Amino acid sequence: MAYPSIYLASTTEELFRRIDQLNPESQALWGKMSVDQMLSHCAVPYEQILGINTDRPPLYMRIILKAYKDSMVNEVPYKQNLPTSPTFIRADSYHFSKVRDRLKELIKTIQEMGAEQLSNTPSLSLGKLSAIEWNNLLYKHIDHHLAQFGV
């Protein structure tokens, strides 16, 4: 089943609707992250695309990630409780509304960036990705974490 297109405003609006159902007391159905940590975690790939966050995974992790690339960019949802790359771990506390609004701003920026420009931007972890691979990677990741918090 194809994922919704992150390049469409309607998908962005639906993601915003789901994000806006969260609140500072939202509890995870699985995993260890708090809701503010999850929002900050979800912002990482968008920040990497835009060059705001240039933290690359260590070499050993990039090798592991490339070995799992197909499972990361395909149309099969992530399983619960998968390990997290060190560059994506968020252990601090964050101001809920600030990280929520920041994530929404980043999602909108990537949507407006469009498929062509995004496909010309390599992933810091996986290298060159097609527009469809970027779509699947980004949508699948945020969908997984919103589902983690029941939205």
Image: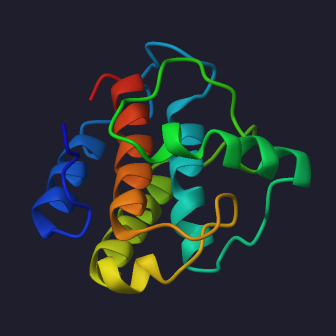
The quarter of the rendered structure image containing the C terminus is top left
Which percent across, then down, holds residue 86? 79, 43
Kindly identify the residue that appears in the image at 51 percent across and 43 percent down: 70
Which percent across, then down, holds residue 125? 69, 58
Kindly identify the residue that appears in the image at 36 percent across and 31 percent down: 76
Q: Is residue 127 left or right of residue 129?
A: right
Asked whether the viewer can see residue 89, the reply is no
In front of the other: 79 or 25? 79
Work out which residue is located at the far right of the displayed protein and give it: 59
Which percent across, then down, holds residue 40? 57, 50
In front of the other: 16 or 61? 61
Instruction: Using the image, determine if residue 107 lies above or below residue 61.
Output: below
Which percent across, then down, holds residue 91? 75, 37
Instruction: Using the image, determine if residue 138 lies above or below residue 46.
Output: above
To which quarter of the image does residue 82 belong?
A: top right
Applied colour scheme: rainbow
Q: Is residue 121 left or right of residue 145?
A: right
